[in-house]
Amino acid sequence: MQFTEPFNSFFRHVIQPVAKKLGLEAFRGSDVYKPGIILDDILRNILESEVVIAEITPGNPNVFYVSPLT
């Protein structure tokens, strides 16, 4: 998901409230502030998640990763 409008509002006003009602915590890659390789953090969070929502419009080849697990 892009980190610009209207995606920021969609995340705050749609995804987060729905996740909360379901007893889940929604967060984005930009919410993870750790030293290290961001791709490792992304893959670990995907593997540890109960649910993954992938909002990938508009297409951006810079954010399409192939997991080494595939």
Image (cartoon, rainbow, N blue to C red):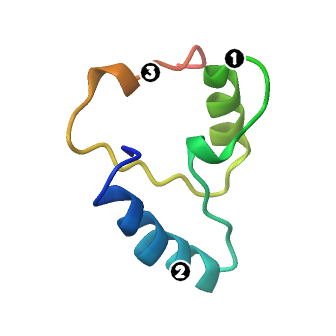
Query: Which residue is at the far bottom?
Result: 21
Label 3 crowd bin: few (<14), some (14–19), many (20+), radius 10 Å:
few
Query: Horizontally, is 7 left or right of 38 in the view?
Result: left
- State the residue at coordinates (28%, 60%): 6
| Residue in the foreground of this view, choosing between 43 and 59 | 59
Label ID, residue 17: 2
Q: Position of residue 32 (x, y in %)?
A: 69, 41
Residue on which the image places disc 1: 37
Residue on which the image places disc 3: 65
Query: Which residue is at the far left?
Result: 58
Label 1 crowd bin: few (<14), some (14–19), many (20+), radius 10 Å:
few
Label 2 crowd bin: few (<14), some (14–19), many (20+), radius 10 Å:
some
Query: Which residue is at the far right?
Result: 35
Query: Do the residues under discs 3 and 2 have CB atoms within 8 angstroms?
Result: no
The secondary structure type at the circle numbered 3 is loop
Instruction: Specify the amino acid type for callout 2.
Output: Pro
Query: Horizontally, is 17 left or right of 2 in the view?
Result: right
Mark pair 1, 3: CA separation: 14 Å
Q: Position of residue 54 (x, y in %)?
A: 41, 48
- State the residue at coordinates (53%, 80%): 17
Q: Position of residue 28 (x, y in %)?
A: 56, 49
Instruction: Specify the amino acid type for callout 3.
Output: Tyr
Mark pair 3, 2: CA separation: 27 Å
The secondary structure type at the circle numbered 1 is loop
The secondary structure type at the circle numbered 2 is helix
The disc, 3 or 2, on the residue closer to the chain's N-terminal end is: 2
| Residue in the foreground of this view, choosing between 62 and 44 | 62
1 vs 3, front mark? 1
- State the residue at coordinates (63%, 79%): 20
Query: Horizontally, is 7 left or right of 16 in the view?
Result: left
